[in-house]
Image (spheres, grey):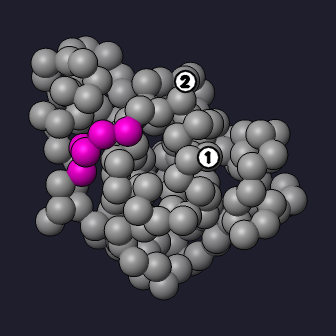
Amino acid sequence: MGTTTRQRTGTPATVVLERAGVPFTMHPYHHDSSAPSFGLEAARALGVMPTRVFKTLLAEVDDDLVVAVVPVSGSLDLKSLARAASGKRAVMAATSQAERATGYVVGGISPFGQRRRLPTIVDESAYGFPTVFVSAGRRGLDVEIAPADLIRLTGAKTATIGRTS
């Protein structure tokens, strides 16, 4: 895995990664707008187990936005997220709210380079792999990164917040 240079595929997420000097690999793929699941589409297109590809979701925990990063092979457990964020109740954020807060479109929300830094919780299963894949800030582009770098650069906590399907 090597650091890539910023090219036409650069996004705010890849700028953050480059500035931090962490090793990462960009993985572009053809995005099919009719795909029912952006994350599973990425896993298939990249030939990677869905447990290694993580989706970035936004939820409201007691009326505050929180970023949740979970494997695309399952779903977000809202009760577990609320507990991990020291809250009582979590609900998914509206699409428009998620896009406004992050500066990204749904299906391309990256945990890096968001418009404003939000509390982030990464599912602890990420530590089960040498690298994981997350959105690079647009549909059809993922970055492969070490879980420790993902957690450090986002200031994330880890917890079991994913639920297997």
Name the residue tied to disc 1.
149
Highlighted magenta segment, given as a residue range:
158-162
* Residue at x 82% of width, y 62% of height: 4
Q: Is residue 77 left or right of residue 56?
A: left
Q: Establish if 115 lies above or below 42.
A: above
Task: Determine the secondary structure under disc 2.
Answer: loop
Residue 77 magenta = no
Q: Report the amino acid beneath label 1.
A: Asp
Name the residue tied to disc 2.
117
How packed mark 2 is, by other alpha carbons closer than 10 Å (few <14, some 14-19, many 20 or more), is some
Q: Is residue 92 left or right of residue 103?
A: left
Q: Which mark is residue 99?
A: none
* Residue at x 18% of width, y 62% of height: 164
**Residue 147 x %, y %:** 53, 52
Are dots 2 and 1 in contact, CB under 8 Å? no
Tell me which label, 2 or 1, sits earlier in the chain.
2
Query: Alpha carbon of mark 2 to alpha carbon of mark 1: how far?
Result: 16 Å
Does residue 3 appear anywhere in the picture? yes
Q: Report the amino acid beneath label 2.
A: Arg
